[in-house]
Image (cartoon, rainbow, N blue to C red):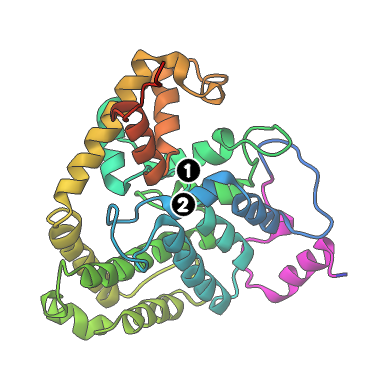
Amino acid sequence: MFSRIEQEKWEQEKLSPAAALSSESRGRLKDDIKCDIRTIFQHDRDRILHSKAFRRLKHKTQVFIAPEGDHYRTRLTHTLEVAQIARTIARALKLNEDLVEAIALGHDLGHTPFGHAGEAVLSEISDKEFQHNNQSLRVVDLLEKRSNGRRGLNLSIEVRDGILKHTGEDKPFTLEGQIVKIADRIAYINHDIDDALRAGLISANDLPRQTMEILGDTHSKRINVMVRDIIKESWQQSEIKRSNKVKNASSDLREFLFANVYIDSKGKNEVAKAKRLLKMLYKHFFENIDLLPEEYLEFEANKKTAIIDYIAGMTDRYAINLGKELFIPTPWLQKNN
């Protein structure tokens, strides 16, 4: 049997000196029994993979709300694409693939229903910016309820840090966390272009010509250029880097998406409906707090925070169905006497 101890020894012998070794992990927030088969990062990955929050990602919007078609990305498919890109980079750099995979699988667990529309509503409700990375950490630390009744997944410090810092200005302290931070952007820039083309929001001719000349004119070419650039620039370095040429081209492409897809798109009406629905749900539970599931109140005294936790965890279809149940009248038949 290839035991945990043997795997830890293999990491020490085979991985880069800059890799985060599972045997040298900073540990968990709470003491926990060590698995005799899996390393701490493998154990973290499995805890995330088997969580209810992870399964809900399949019914959460990535960009397009309620699209008609089977091939548009969801938060789940986005997450899997991030994990694949990040593992490719980590393997080429001889870094810890298990840590990269755990961070990637957990990085978006705190995303709201209806994507950025949901984030905007919860920011408005809470009077401060709702940040999905903070909520993802809240999910793995507190909100997720395990089969043994315990709250939180009790993940390693390295995975928690990577989840928290996968977006924003702060840099993860492991190279593996830094890989996920960039892989997230590589994934969503490219698959959002793919989905926008499929939806007819943009055409191939709309894409910035100079950027296409640098990165490539197809989905696979762009990802290949971005990934190879990171591997080349980061080999035997103390941080994960990109060349200025590819980094600037990627930023230009991201700005194009914000201007032409994320902000000004044909889905504005659906975004407005989604925002209105979430506001109605919040108002309903704030005025009828006794109807909120008990599990959100048993550890959170602030009812506003408890309701936000509940709404943030909803899938798109759950929010829609709950809205129909609460706000849409249904026909009824009176029995004949």
Q: Quadrant of residue 121?
A: top left
Q: Residue 143: x, y in percent?
A: 55, 34
Q: Residue 299: x, y in percent?
A: 56, 21
Of tags 2 and 1, which is closer to the observer?
2
Residue drawn at x 33%, y 33% is 323
Does the magenta segment cover residue 61?
no
Magenta range is 2-27
Does the magenta segment cover residue 8?
yes
Q: Quadrant of residue 207?
A: bottom left
Query: Is residue 63 shown above or below 91?
Result: above
Regarding residue 306, the answer to whether it shows in the image is yes
Q: How crowded is the residue under tag 1: few (<14 C-alpha within 10 Å), some, or many (20+)?
A: many
The residue labelled by disc 1 is 136
Q: Nearer the viewer, residue 102 or 147?
A: 147
Residue drawn at x 23%, y 83% is 214
Q: Nearer the viewer, residue 25 or 3?
A: 3
What residue type is disc 1 on? Ser
Q: Residue 256: x, y in percent?
A: 16, 65
Quadrant location of the C terminus in the rendered image:
top left
Q: Secondary structure at mark 2?
A: helix
128 left or right, relative to 268: right
> Upstream in the sequence, badge 2 or badge 1?
2
Q: How crowded is the residue under tag 2: few (<14 C-alpha within 10 Å), some, or many (20+)?
A: many
Q: Secondary structure at mark 1?
A: helix
The residue labelled by disc 2 is 57
